[in-house]
């Protein structure tokens, strides 16, 4: 892939790109590449997500409660272990 520098971007365009990136949860660079690709008639490549956001909300309330209880029990310090 080629790296390019774009100069003299109008303030309102820069503000739009920053706002769009923030609302999409992407970088300004990724947003700009996607918009330029679409404008040129190409669909941007989809990048694989590198986070675990797809797991959010996948536990039932009961599973979440049991997890929280287990984690809390691990935080208890048994004074005998430190003698």
Image (tube, rainbow, N blue to C red):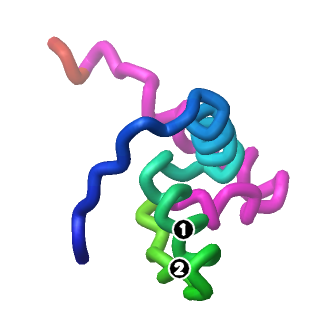
For label 1, the SS is helix
Mark 1 touches mark 2? (CB < 8 Å): no
Helix, strand or loop for the magenta stretch, by majority = helix
Residue in view at x 31 percent, y 14 percent:
79
Q: Is residue 44 shown to the viewer in this render?
A: yes
Q: Give the range drawn in magenta.
A: 52-80
Judged from this view, the residue extending furthest toward the left is: 83
Q: Where is residue 48 in the image (x, y as percent from the top left)?
A: 45, 75
Of labels 1 and 2, earlier in sequence is 1
Residue at mark 1: 36
Residue at mark 2: 44
The correct choice, above or below, for 26 with respect to 3 in the image is above
Judged from this view, the residue extending furthest toward the right is: 61
Residue 72 belongs to magenta span: yes
The correct choice, above or below, for 36 with respect to 23 in the image is below
The C terminus - image quarter: top left
């Amino acid at each position: 892939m080629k790296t390019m520098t774009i100069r003299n971007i109008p303030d309102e365009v820069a503000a739009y790109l920053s706002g769009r990136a923030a609302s999409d949860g992407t970088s300004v660079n990724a947003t700009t590449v996607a918009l330029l690709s679409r404008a040129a008639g190409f669909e941007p490549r989809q990048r694989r997500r590198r986070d675990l956001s797809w797991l959010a909300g996948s536990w039932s309330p009961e599973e979440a409660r049991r997890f929280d209880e287990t984690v809390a029990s691990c935080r208890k310090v048994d004074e005998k272990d430190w003698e």
